[in-house]
Amino acid sequence: MPGPLDGVKVIDLTTIYSGPICASILGDHGADVIKVEAPIGDTMRAGGRNARNGVPGPFAMMNRNKRAMVLDLSGDDGKAVMRRMLTQADVVVENYRPDVMGRLGFGWDQLQAINDRLIYASINGVGAEGPYAKRRVYDAVIQAISGIAALQADPSVEKPQMINTLLCDKLTAITAAQNICSALYARERTGRGQRVQVSMLDSSLFFMWPDSMANFTFVGDEMPQGTYGNHAYFVRETKDGYIATMPVKRGEWQGLFDALELSNLLIDDPRFSTPMARQANSQLFQKMLNDSYKKFTTKELVKRLEINQVPFAEINSRPQVIEDPQIKAMGALLEFDHPLGGRMRQPRPPGRFSDTETDIFRCSPELGEHTVEVLEEFGFSPDEVHSLAERGITQPFQG
């Protein structure tokens, strides 16, 4: 079956993480994504230790479901090729710094003149205005500005800590893909494209606000400041390891007390018999819970928590994620053969559709693998394609 974005042609000018992930999501949904690279290629092709046969694992994930061509945009001839391609495109995605596309001659005004149905999506760090707009911005910078690093601070020392993943890049990629789809839907009603600007900072603030910034929602009144939540309480040490539990509703708390053999004590002791009392005696309450968890092995607690319908999970190490029975039952990880990288494993696209398909339609492409194919589809004659290659404006695939 075709994907829900079948027939949508995307010009992907992005590199590194946020932009390529965004474009790959569109590809997962069936869009024809054309990755346009300079002759040196995307930096992520270098790979390092996470590579096999010259194919980096991260690059393979972030650039699946794309075709690739080489085009040198530094000169007028390369720009002329891009303008010709843009007349037939539906979406262009870039994650340059805010002033780069304008300097190249592809600012919003120029793109509207080329194709007024084009969706122009810009992904950047902090937007085009403000004191930080000229800075180089990566994930750690946004974790710092948005409060995410402070969120992870150890309460005992208040030292900020970064989340050990490129959280802000990936949040922004998902946000940008959703915004592009909204712009495509609007175009169906209006007939016109529009500019979509998505910053990492906006995406991260939106992510933080519902729970982690609740103290800063109301303006103008002296509101009592609630204590910051500590998710460390969701990880509990057992007799032989660790387990995660997250009771929220009253029945779930009662189930936890039953599982830990604490029901009678909590009912009979006025210090713990109500949620308010437990909060007032939080330190003692948490110690009592921790001591009770340590009386049981993880395997014993799994049975007890499941019987009592407590939200819980064993805590997987990264290797254990692959073997988790729920992940296997869902078919959440797909295996396939990459022509160069060999057997690979990647997550399936997370959205499941009843009438269209999301899937891994293409493996990540080699540098310039589809240059000739793409140019011919955009109406370039064989002689034009040959001339562009001879002048170094494009680079046919040498594989």
Image (cartoon, grey):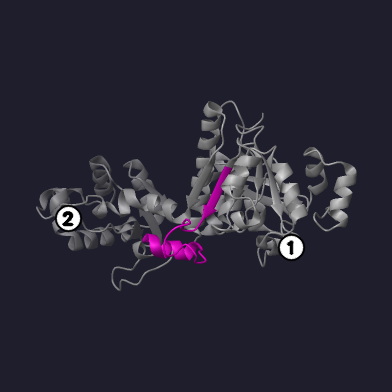
Residue 225 appears anywhere in the view:
yes
Nearest the viewer among 8 and 186 is 186
Is there CB contact under 8 Å for labels 2 and 1?
no
Residue depicted at x 24% and y 54%: 215
Q: Position of residue 48 (x, y in %)?
A: 67, 67
Disc 2 from disc 1: Cα separation: 59 Å
Tell us which disc is closer to us: 2 or 1.
Answer: 1
Task: Farthest residue to the left: give it.
Answer: 270
Q: Classify residue 292 as left or right of residue 346.
A: left
Bounds of the magenta segment: 120-148
Earlier sequence position, callout 2 versus callout 1: 1
Residue depicted at x 43% and y 56%: 201
Q: Residues within 10 Å of mark 2 (few under 14, many from 20)?
A: some
Q: Classify residue 261 as left or right of residue 387.
A: left
Q: Quadrant of the N terminus?
A: top right
Q: Position of residue 175 (x, y in %)?
A: 49, 46
Question: What SS does tag 2 mark?
Answer: helix
Q: Quadrant of the C terminus?
A: bottom right
**Residue 26 colored magenta?**
no
Residue with the mark numbered 2: 279
Residue with the mark numbered 1: 40
Question: What SS does tag 1 mark?
Answer: loop
Q: Classify residue 137 as left or right of residue 210.
A: right
Residue 68 appears anywhere in the view:
no
Nearest the viewer among 326 and 223 is 223
**Residue 133 colored magenta?**
yes
Amino acid type, mark 1: Ile
Residue 359: image quadrant is top right
Residue 90 higher or lower than 216, as above or below = above
